[in-house]
Image: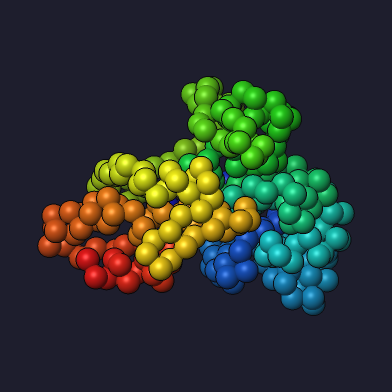
């Protein structure tokens, strides 16, 4: 938020100068986009979540027209697939990163825009594999298999599932993104934010965790953890990496005692919360 994406996107849309424009956004942002266009641009603006407005949207407008609709409703309006020669703008484009979702399939396969504008403050959330569908929409005709082969490092887990371990050729990926119209802006270019420091604190695995990982069962006093299903094994493994790890709690105590500042702590389980509160 606060990067000026709304103005950047709408100004680009005006420059592209198509008579018909479609904005797809989150439901909570529909009215914000409508108010923005009404206030700043001499265009007819229609709320496509409203059935009457949706019908009027198809009528000719002298100065061009903008239709605004949310992701969850867009694929339920098959008439939109009949639009031609229009500009499509997606706000929070990361919402189409799952190409198998209905909304993504509709946007990627059914819509035929002349121009595409994607806006996002978090296009990947640090995970480059999530870029493929967005880049595909921008015209990069690379298959998902080839994309992963060139830019994503993977390995197969003992259970047979693929695990992403890192990324490769990142500079080339960014270059290809720029070639397809991506503009990278950092928050400090737009507003001042306090410096963020990330300090990893590594904690050794406990002997209980190692035992559970090997045998699927471990006992803590009166508590017995049995990983008899995939779900319970994952759940208890997470607990053993958290509040059941004495070294982890000690590291947390050291952090708390190292500052008088107010802290925000994220936790997973109610039992974990009680341990953290006691510290």
Q: Quadrant of residue 15?
A: top right
| Residue sitting at x 67%, y 37% | 160
Q: How is the image coloured?
A: rainbow
| Residue sitting at x 28%, y 54% | 246
Indicate the position of residue 122 as horizontal and vertical percent values. Answer: 50, 49
Question: The N terminus appears in which quarter of the rendering?
Answer: bottom left
Indicate the position of residue 242 as horizontal and vertical percent values. Answer: 38, 56
Q: Nearer the viewer, residue 44 or 168?
A: 168
Indicate the position of residue 18 as horizontal and vertical percent values. Answer: 71, 48
Q: Nearer the viewer, residue 94 or 270?
A: 270
Q: Quadrant of residue 256?
A: bottom left
Q: Nearer the viewer, residue 260 or 5?
A: 260
Question: The C terminus appears in which quarter of the rendering?
Answer: bottom left
Q: Is residue 242 above or below residue 126?
A: below
Confirm whether residue 11 shows in the render.
no
| Residue sitting at x 43%, y 66% | 223
User: How many tags in the picture?
Assistant: 0
Confirm whether residue 140 shows in the render.
yes
Q: Is residue 136 above or below residue 46?
A: above
| Residue sitting at x 67%, y 49% | 98
Q: Quadrant of residue 276?
A: bottom left
Q: Nearer the viewer, residue 226 or 247?
A: 226
Q: Is residue 38 above or below residue 194?
A: below
Q: Is residue 108 above or below residue 223?
A: above
Indicate the position of residue 260 as horizontal and vertical percent values. Answer: 12, 62
Q: Residue 98 vs residue 215: left or right?
A: right
């Amino acid at each position: 938020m606060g990067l000026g994406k709304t103005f950047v996107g709408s100004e680009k849309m005006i420059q592209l100068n198509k008579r018909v424009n479609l904005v797809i956004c989150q439901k909570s942002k529909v009215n914000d986009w409508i108010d923005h266009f009404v206030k700043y641009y001499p265009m007819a603006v229609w709320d496509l979540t409203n059935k009457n407005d949706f019908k009027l949207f198809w009528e000719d407008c002298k100065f061009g027209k903008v239709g605004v609709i949310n992701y969850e409703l867009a694929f339920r309006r098959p008439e939109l697939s009949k639009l031609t020669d229009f500009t499509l703008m997606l706000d929070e484009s990361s919402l189409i990163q799952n190409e198998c979702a209905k909304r993504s399939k509709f946007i990627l396969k059914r819509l035929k825009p002349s121009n595409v504008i994607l806006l996002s403050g978090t296009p990947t959330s640090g995970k480059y594999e999530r870029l493929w569908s967005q880049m595909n929409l921008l015209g990069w005709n690379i298959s998902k298999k080839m994309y992963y082969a060139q830019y994503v490092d993977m390995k197969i887990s003992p259970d047979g599932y693929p695990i992403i371990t890192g990324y490769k050729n990142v500079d080339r990926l960014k270059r290809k993104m720029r070639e397809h119209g991506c503009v990278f802006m950092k928050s400090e270019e737009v507003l001042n934010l306090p410096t963020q420091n990330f300090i990893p604190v590594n904690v050794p695995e406990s002997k209980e965790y190692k035992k559970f990982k090997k045998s699927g069962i471990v006992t803590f006093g009166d508590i017995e953890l049995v990983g008899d299903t995939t779900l319970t094994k994952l759940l208890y493994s997470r607990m053993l990496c958290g509040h059941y790890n004495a070294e982890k709690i000690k590291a947390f105590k050291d952090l708390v005692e190292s500052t008088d500042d107010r802290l925000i702590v994220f936790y997973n389980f109610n039992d974990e919360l009680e341990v953290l509160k006691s510290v």
